Image: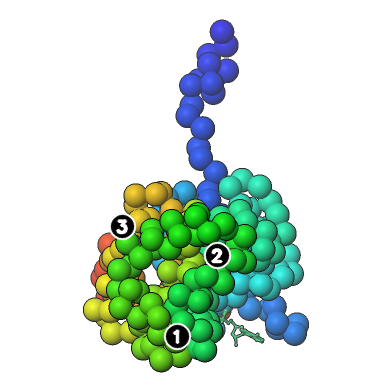
Amino acid sequence: MNMAVSALRDTPAVPAPALAVRGLRASYAGREVLSGVDLALAAGEVLCLVGHNGAGKSTLLKILFGLHPPDTGEVVLRGRALKPHPSFMARDGVAYVPEGRGVFPGLTVKEIFTLALWSASLGAGEGRARIDEVLELLPKLKDFWLKRAGQLSGGQQQMVSIGRALLSRPGILLLDEPSIGLAPKLFQDLMAPIRAIQQRRGMSILLVEQNVGEAFAVSDRVVAMKSGVMIYEGTPADLADRAKLLTLF
Ligand SMILES: Nc1ncnc2c1ncn2[C@@H]1O[C@H](COP(=O)(O)OP(=O)(O)OP(=O)(O)O)[C@@H](O)[C@H]1O
């Protein structure tokens, strides 16, 4: 057999990234806020996206979930280029937790979860199993299960919001600034079980964070953005040097 062909056959296939963007440009009312972003979230990794206010991090997450249309560029889900739409992305195992919780203040936690299961068309038996799974993962939810979300603290609401996203057993989780309004210890309490299930299930997480210290502790890789472009990519250890980090902001 031709040696080159044989070598090709023996090369293990590189797995497609869980989610990627290529040449992404985006704007609001004609003002460009993403100016050619290429980013790949590997299968099973936690990638932390950092950058100053207005760098375009949240816009990137919104595009990935189909909440904002790109001007040009491609979104590729597990090797397949597509036009994202929230319901199709959810069906394909992508969950998005927006900045600011987004829980209905007048509903109890139980009602919020029931509504999420209903909109995912999950039957009662399967729904119960999913709720048990999330309560096992985030047991503190039981403490305020029958309380209205509007009466909960910021950290508790954040837990509800993330717990609701986990109900769908996503393969890919997009988390926009889960630490907002949380003390570092609370953020760690929230992220530790998420990191544990991420590792157990091989879930991929794209985490947007300003709170770099705590976020880096649960991340495999870090990408920094500035004014709509990526300016740095490395491991959290690479950026542990504070002086280096400061040069990025
Ligand atoms: N709905 C919108 N309409 C108009 N401009 C917007 C809108 N959302 C965001 N922008 C602008 O787009 C730019 C990028 O915003 P984006 O929220 O993506 O940045 P970010 O990096 O997530 O910032 P932050 O860390 O402050 O959340 C900013 O200049 C912002 O003002």
Residue 230's place in the image compared with 243, above or below, is above
Residue for badge 1: 149
Residue 117 numbered tag: 2
As drawn, the label of residue 158 is none
Q: From the viewer's side, name the closer residue of 100 and 21.
A: 100
Task: Tell me the residue at 58%/47% (across/down).
Answer: 78
- Residue type beneath disc 3: Ala
Q: Is residue 103 above or below residue 82?
A: below
**Residue annotated with mark 3:** 196
Q: Which residue is nearer to you in this view: 156 or 243?
A: 156
Residue neighbourhood size for the residue with mark 2, other residues' Cα within 10 Å, grouped as few (<14), some (14–19), many (≥20) = many
Using the rendered image of the protein, determine whether residue 164 is visible from the camera's viewpoint. yes
Estimate how packed mark 1 is, as few (under 14), some (14 to 19) or many (20 or more) residues with alpha carbons within 10 Å: many
Secondary structure of the residue carrying numbered label 3: helix
The amino acid pointed to by label 2 is: Leu
Identify the image quadrant of residue 1: top right
Indicate yes or no: mark 2 CB to ligand 1 under 8 Å: no
The mark lying in front, picked from 3 and 1, is: 1
Which three-letter amino acid code belongs to the residue tagged 1? Ala
| Residue lying at 38% horizontally and 61% vertically, measured from the top left | 132
Sequence-wise first label, 1 or 2: 2
